[in-house]
Amino acid sequence: LLRLWLPLCTLTTAAVLAGCAQNPVTSSPRGSLTEAQDHARGGRDKAKATSQVNFGLNQPLSQNKADGLTSGQIRELLEPRTFLGTMSCPPADKSCMPVRLVVTMSPEGVWRMRATDITQNVAPVTSEGCWHQIGSNPTRIVLMTQNETVFGDFSFMYDHQLRVNVFNYIRPTLETHLSRQPDIDPIEELPNHVGLNCRP
């Protein structure tokens, strides 16, 4: 089932296609997402360029290691990291449009995303919010928007790879992974503000 551009209340544009020919999350996974949302509430080399994005990329890795894991931190994100991947389509689905995702996350709990429809000449959609850990072995996180909507659910397969469990309320029918990139992509299309506090 093609799901394009689902609206998010606090974003200025609609969210990009979460994937094609995918099954909606059943009532049980939606319940788990609700629990995850409640749990989360409780609780560049590019970064050195002249743009100086300030959304949690300013905490030195050495300081994090010296202090150990603080509340809300996870081992896989002791430094800012960018992951890239494509929400692909089953071969039999000719109407599917694959979407390329770029997600950058900081140790301070901030995430930024750029989603691009790679089959059409349209502008990418960007969004941001806070990430929270909801599981371990493997480490599992959710991406929440600024209005506390669960936007994505990911598991760390390794330090350098994320598995997409749910994206924009859609569960991929194909195994989908995002791979760590050598450079940090600050998603410069989003404003450089410091008002997003993910670790109060």
Image (cartoon, grey):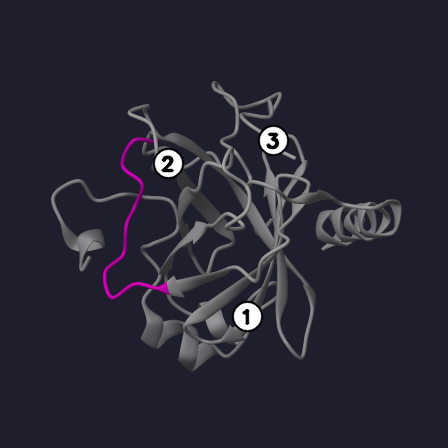
Residue 156's label in the rendered image is 1
Circle 2 SS class: strand
Q: Earlier in the sequence, mark 3 or mark 2?
A: 3
Q: Earlier in the sequence, mark 1 or mark 3?
A: 3
Q: Pointers 1 and 2 in contact (CB under 8 A)?
A: no
Q: Residue furthest front?
A: 92
Q: Residue at x 57, y 52 (%)?
A: 131
Q: Position of residue 69 (x, y in %)?
A: 54, 75
Near mark 2 (Cα within 10 A), the count class, few <14, some 14-19 or many ≥20, is many
Circle 1 SS class: strand
The alpha-carbon separation of the residues under discs 3 and 2 comes to 14 Å
Q: Residue at x 31, y 41 (%)?
A: 187
Q: Residue at x 32, y 44 (%)?
A: 54
**Which mark is nearer the camera, 1 or 2?**
2
Q: Position of residue 77 (x, y in %)?
A: 46, 67
Foreground residue, 112 or 197?
Answer: 112
Q: Residue furthest left?
A: 50
The residue that mark 2 highlights is: 116
**Which mark is nearer the camera, 3 or 2?**
3
Q: Which residues are drawn in magenta? A: 180-190
Q: Earlier in the sequence, mark 1 or mark 2?
A: 2
Q: Position of residue 182 (x, y in %)?
A: 24, 66
Circle 3 SS class: loop
Residue type at mark 1 is Phe
The residue that mark 3 highlights is: 3
Residue 140 part of the magenta segment = no
What secondary structure do most residues of the magenta stretch adopt?
loop
Residue type at mark 3 is Arg
